[in-house]
Every structure is written in C-alpha cells, then in structure tokens.
Image (cartoon, rainbow, N blue to C red):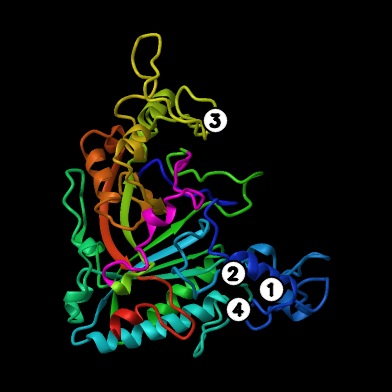
Amino acid sequence: MTDQSTPEATSPIPSPAATASARAGTAAGAGVSRRRLLGTAGATGLVLGAAGAGLGYTAAPAGATPLTSLGADRAMFHGKHQPGITDALQARGHLVAFDLAPGAGRKEAAALLRRWSATAERLMAGEPTAHDDTDVARDAGPSALTITFGFGHSFFDRTDLRRQRPGALDPLPDFSSDRLDKARSNGDLWVQIGANDALVAFHALRTLQKDAGGAARVRWQMNGFNRSPGATARPMTARNLMGQIDGTRNPKPADPDFDQRLFVPANGDPAWMANGSYVVVRRIRMLLDDWEKLSLPQQENVIGRRKSDGAPLGGSTETTAMDLEKTGKDGTYVVPVNAHARITRPDQNGGAAMLRRPFSYHDGFAADGAPDAGLLFICWQADPLRGFVPVQRKLDRGDALSAYIRHEASGLFAVPGGAAKGEYVGQRLLEG
C-alpha cells in the first residue's frame, strides 16, 4: 500500500466527461436501464400486486423513485482511455485473469476481444446482453459499471506477437517481502469490473466468463468492495480495513504531469499502446490480528498519519503538507523515518507516482480465526519501472507497515487505450 489512493465519493478523478453527460441524458429521458426498468409507471414505485406480495415482495413506499442517481450513473465504453482507470471508486469490484485455451492464438484472441468489447458496451449502457441474458441485473441501471481489459506478458507468446510486447511489460523484480502464489498471479488476459451495485458487477463477471467460451479459461478471480457512494455525510477519502484513511496524495487531473505519469503518449512505443496505461495488481493480506494489538499511537507512527482524519503527524488537516524535518521535544522526527507515508512520498522517490484505485477484500477466516482480508492493490502508471518498482523497492528496505501485511499474488498487465466507436479493445495490436 502507498500514501496514494482515490477518494470514494466525489472523487477529484472523475470519469472522462462521461458521467456528467450520462446524467444529463437520463434527466432528459434517455434510456439507461435494462429493459425499461420495472416500476417506471407511476409515483407509487414498484407495485407487484397481491401475487407479488404473496411471494414475499414488498411494494416501494409512496413517492419512491425506482431508479436513483446511484443506479443512473453511467460511464462510457468508447473514449481516449479505457474506463475504470480515472473513474471514481466503485462499491463492488471483480478482478479476473484468463489464460487462452490450448490451441487458441491470435485469431481466437481477436474474436474474444471483439465479443467482450461488444458485451462491455451494452452492459455499461445498462442494456441486457445480446444473447441469453441471465436477468441478474434486470431491474438495475448502469450503476457506474466499468469494464477494463489488459494483456499479460504471456499473451504475446501465445499469439505470436512477441515483437509487439512492450519493454515496460517485463516481469516485475522479486521483492523480499513477497509470498506470491503463482496460481493466483499473472495470466494472458486481465479484466477489471467495477460497479456501485453488486448484482450489476456479478452480472458483468458471469457474462464475460460465458463469452470466453472455448477460447479462454479463468486462471484466477478476486472479489473486492469499497464503501458505497453516499454512505458518509460528505465526500471523504476511503478507509482501508486497518481503519486508516488511505490515499490522500493520489495524483489528480489538475496536476500538470497527470497524463504523463498515467498514460502512454499518443506517439509512444509500441504504437498500439497509445493512450494506454500499465496496471500492477497485488493481493495484499493485512495481518489484522497483529495490527489491532497495536495502540492508536503505535498505528499512527507506522503509517505517519492520524487515524481519525488522515492528517500527517504534526499537521492540522488531511491535505496539510507533511513536514519531514519536524521534530518533537525529544529530538526525534514527528513522522518516523520508517513511516509508510514518508517512504511512499513521490518527492522521496524521484517523483515516482501512480494512481491507485484499490478494493478491499475479505475471503473468510482461517482455522485459528485470523481473517483472510486486506487490499486488492491496483495502481496505474505510464511505466511501471518508473512508477511501482522504485517505490516498492524502497518499501522493501524498511517500511514499518511491512510487518503487518503480506503480498500474496501479483500481476502486471498492458492496458491499451480506449476503443473508438466501431472498434474493439486491442484491435490495433491484434489486427495491426
């Protein structure tokens, strides 16, 4: 984890001009729901009648609006960049990696990405799938659904496209704190799904898995969550499962070098990655039983920020600049030298920065009652050798937080730029 993340509600990293225009369209009566949402006929909400009530359904209270703003939020599939990178955090997420089936190559991969792109466009618009829709999300709007596709290092071997493999996709170096499960790492293809409704997110996951058909098989899959938009009285930076405000220093679009840090330039190399980005995915278990034994001051010294409001130690508010030279009465630094927030500061890492857009996860309990819970770390950058790698190397050498986390899975994927209307994601690579 680093001291960079995305606020959960009114994010300073908005969707690329998509959400606002979608809301305007909704207000004007544009169709954003699956099969013209049930319940749009009348101010009394969902009235199912006696038969419905007998089955245990409850009519919505008088005056209820069937489709709230939460369900109406819509991201655009087509654009300069793929969705799911600069969009605000969503309440529910799925990460899934696929391996191409034995015998499948470039032709099959192209057909699969064509199917997946067509499906993603429909689902993100709040429409049912073209064939055999499961009706899981029938009554919901788009719910800010985003679907993002990427290619792993092995994809280029499987498709005989080695000459097109970017140098930035070279395998990540080993880190001393890694405890990686190879079966839950890497993969030929990577898909990120995010939505503000759990059923909408699951519907997308199930549909894309079915769309893979005989061309690809699931290698691994992880489920995550965040606080629901609107759950707090005001927009706030998200908290992680350690209870810590996580991500005050995330890059913002207003930063003059935002695009430079996040995206491959339009004239970049290779050409098919123009306007794309690279994503590092890490499953980081939090050793919560150990963490929760620490006192509040001990936890704050590990992070370097106050738990209550995210302010740097010795600072007044969350956005107060961290004073790395400030000392206490005993002459020691107020922000300890091994504090996580100190080590991860971009100005302490040659300007290295990445846009973090994580999900928390909880996958049950071990026999001793320890929770299998933590962070699905997702970070975006124009070049992982200048983004993730230098920061992680420094963390590896002495981060106080390392004693309370464990990196258990890892992946690096090349995420091409967005598909233009009529194109599918990756078309410039697969048909170039």
Give the mark, 2 or 1, whose residue is nearer the N terminus: 1
Reply yes or no: does residue 246 show up in magenta.
yes
- Few, some or many C-alpha atoms within 10 Å of disc 2 (few <14, some 14-19, many ≥20)? many
Say what amino acid the circle numbered 4 marks: Arg
Q: Earlier in the sequence, mark 3 or mark 2?
A: 2
Residue 392 seen: yes
Dots 4, 2 in contact, CB < 8 A: no
Q: Is residue 94 above or below residue 320?
A: below
Position above or below: 386 against 90: above
- Per the image, the residue denoted by label 2 is 74
Let me know if residue 357 appears in the view. Answer: no
Q: Nearer the viewer, mark 4 or mark 2?
A: 2
Position of the N terminus, as image quadrant, is top left
- Mark 3 or mark 4: whose residue is earlier in sequence: 4
Quickly name the residue at label 1.
25
Q: Amino acid at mark 2?
A: Arg
Mark 2 vs mark 1, CA separation in Å: 10 Å
Give how far apart the Cα atoms at labels 4 and 2 are. Answer: 16 Å
Q: Residue at x 29, y 41 (%)?
A: 350
- Residue interval drawn in magenta: 245-270
Residue at mark 4: 138
Q: Where 239 falls versus 329 (above or below)?
A: below
Relative to residue 114, is residue 310 drawn left or right?
A: right
Q: Between disc 4 and disc 2, whose residue precedes? A: 2
Location of residue 70 (image quadrant)? bottom right
Q: Are marks 2 and 1 in contact (CB under 8 Å)?
A: yes
Q: The disc labelled 1 sits on which kind of residue?
A: Gly
Q: Are marks 3 and 4 in contact (CB under 8 Å)?
A: no
